[in-house]
Amino acid sequence: MKAVVQRVTKTTLKCDGKLISEIGLGLVVYFGVAQGDTTDKAVYLARKIANLRVFEDDNKKMNLSVKDVNGEILAVSQFTLLGEVSHGNRPSYSNAEEPTKANEMYQFFMEKLKEEGVPVKPGVFGGDMKIEQFNDGPVTILYEI
């Protein structure tokens, strides 16, 4: 399981020209599921991300979580995070989970984020999404578990 977490001030996600999700201050989480990933990993990752202290406090120190700043999370399923590029120039996605299971894990992950007390907006699983994102910092954290 992999996740790329980016701190943002505003993000919009469209699919087929239609606005699907929009957040203000918060995190965009690109989430990829590998074959064999378990719900335990998703629970762990949701807890870690919900409590990740990457927002500045009054002393300009990254000491606050998305919950502390009343932020939101936009969760985007991203199978390309599982791309293997060690051989050749074309990524192989053979380690990515098959779509039905990956979508179940993505839905489960979003539910666990909500249980952590964070408002969560979805992407479109398998959709051709267009994302406008205003990175803040930029701050980007990579999780691989």
Image: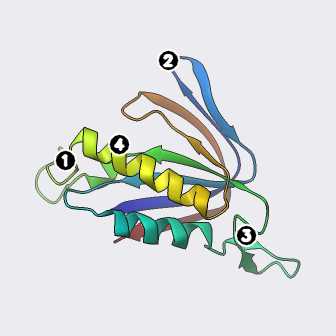
Q: Whole-Å distance between the Cαs marked 1 and 4?
A: 16 Å
Rendered location of residue 115, percent (x, y): 59, 60
* Residue shown at the point (26%, 39%) measured from the top left: 99
Residue type at tag 1: Tyr
Q: Horizontally, is 120 left or right of 42 in the view?
A: right
Residue named by callout 4: 103
- In front of the other: 26 or 60: 26
Q: Residues within 10 Å of mark 4 (few under 14, many from 20)?
A: some
Mark 1 → mark 2, Cα distance in angstroms = 25 Å
Q: Quadrant of the C terminus?
A: bottom left
Residue under numbered circle 3: 55
Label 3 is placed on what type of residue?
Phe
Residue 102 picture location, percent across and down: 30, 46
Residue wearing tag 1: 93
Mark 3 and mark 4: Cα distance apart in space: 29 Å
The circle drawn on residue 70 is none
What secondary structure is marked by label 4?
Answer: helix
